[in-house]
Image: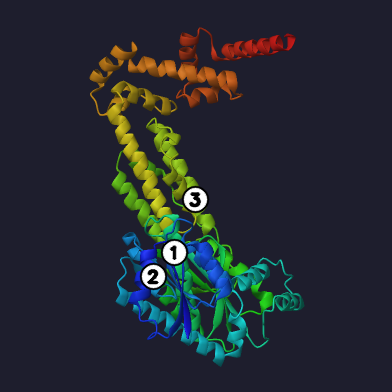
Amino acid sequence: MLQLLIVDDERVAIEAIRHAIPWEELEISGVFEASNIKKAKEIFEEQSIDILLCDIEMPQGSGLELLEWVRENAPMTVTIFLTCHADFQFAKKAMELGSLDYILKPLPYDELTAAIQKAIQKIKKDSESLENNQFRQAWNRHHPQLFENFWLEVIEQSIPPNPQAILEAASSRKISLPDRMKYVPILLKIHRWNKEFNKREIKILEYALRNAGQELLFNKNGGSGHLIAIDENTLLTIQAYEELPNADSLLANCRLFIEASNQYFYCDLCCYIGKPSAVHEMAGAVEELLEYDQNNVTEINKALIVSEKYRASAVIDLPDMTMWGILLQENARDRALIEIKEYLVRLSHGKGVDKQVLQRFQQNFIQMLYYVLQVKGVQAHELYSDQKSFLLVSQVNHNIQDLVVWVENAVNKAMNYISSKELKDSVVQRVINYISANLDEDLSRDSIADYIGMNPDYLTRVFKKETGLSVVEYISQQRVERAKELLSKTEMQISMVAASVGYHNFSHFSQMFKKHAFMNPGAYRNHSRSLNSYSISGQRRD
């Protein structure tokens, strides 16, 4: 005979469940009730509870908090969640894959009865398995948290990685590690959630993932194991077998888990199957899996067997991005994106592509894109300081798919802003921005008019009306101002200063400089240095 606990802050809901369910037919001898988490914990400490019916939202704490406590203190209890929130419908199928079920209020009592029957069948099945398998009984009789802490200490090498130290640590925790058992680590890495969820919803999905993993990864091959949270979005299973299943069987189970995760949990992930290892070898085996995952940037939603340490790739030549930049400057956004994506697809099919390759690509791409922004007179911080951009940048090195998302977002954000800015800016301001960004180029009235898309004579009249200078006069003035700055603040040779502001004929540069500055470039440099020296010495006297 089994015992069940109902936890709900609505007294009417508890009474309705009490009277609607045929407890005797279900062979449930004890039905307890609690209106809050505190009372529920007290009942667990006094009674052996087989099934928990729990409202997910209560004023004094959520059902998820109670579930975490139950997992540590009564791990064999099967939980069924109740809630009135229809927006959780997405989780229903997910919960059905594990020991957890999920039912919406107002409760369909036939569905609730079926869920309780399912829980009872699971309890009986688990009980029979425990009786028929001595090792599984030893493996599962401990709290999951005890095992999780033990394996984390093994993996992090808090317990020295030698057989004797590990056996002593296991013995002190009353954990059985028979010599005949073989252990297989499988790393489960969630790459992304394909819907936007709040923290509460993600917690539900993560718990459902753990249950699905228990069902699809352990039970199908007669193994026993526990899921361990390595960090956010990373789970590790340590599976123990008396007889190892073949690799094809493990791969098939992982593929089933990946398909279920895609369909019901709205996430993309990879499963990395490690080599069978002794307990003292587990830290090294898991390190290989983590390293392989870090550098796996081309595979997603795949089950992979990792048989050796990741090897650094040979240097991959990255593309010259000049043409992409020209296309963007010419506002040919669609063509540029097509070419970029085609390249990344080819890259994803190549050998030796790893995290470092993606980092190098991103750095080169940022340099190209920022140059386009500079030419268009846009400051990068105006575009990429929002939260979404920060998040996408942090995900770029995960895989090529994330890199494609980041590239598309960065380009679209830049081009949309440029288009908007060009509509707002006056013709004169666009000319000024273009001149400022291209002082070292062969600028002329006609080339600027062609860039702006305006008749050269009309452009000259508009520009002179607003600035008082012709386009050619303004270019000369700006070149001299830039040259003054370089002469006074750098050690560049005067001929290099001339070239950097667009003058390749030194005598022409000197003539133009003297016309505007009333002294030649060398004299200006000496004069500016003497002024700086006087200023510094004057400060010292003060």
Q: Residue 444's spot in the image, x, y percent?
A: 34, 23
Q: Residue flagged by tag 3: what amino acid is it?
A: Ser
Q: Can you identify the residue that label 1 sits on?
A: 204
The disc placed on residue 94 is: 2
* Residue contact at pointers 3 and 1, CB within 8 angstroms: no
Asked if residue 199 lies left or right of residue 430, the reply is right
Q: Residues within 10 Å of mark 3 (few under 14, many from 20)?
A: few
Circle nearer the viewer, 3 or 2: 2
Q: Residue 167's spot in the image, x, y percent?
A: 73, 79
Q: Is residue 248 visible?
A: no
- Alpha carbon of mark 3 to alpha carbon of mark 2: how far? 29 Å
On screen, residue 446 above or below 310? above
Q: Residue 239's spot in the image, x, y percent?
A: 57, 79
Please name the residue shown 59% across and 15% down the image. 525
Please name the residue shown 49% across and 50% down the image. 394
* Residue contact at pointers 1 and 2, CB within 8 angstroms: yes
Q: Can you identify the residue that label 3 sits on?
A: 394
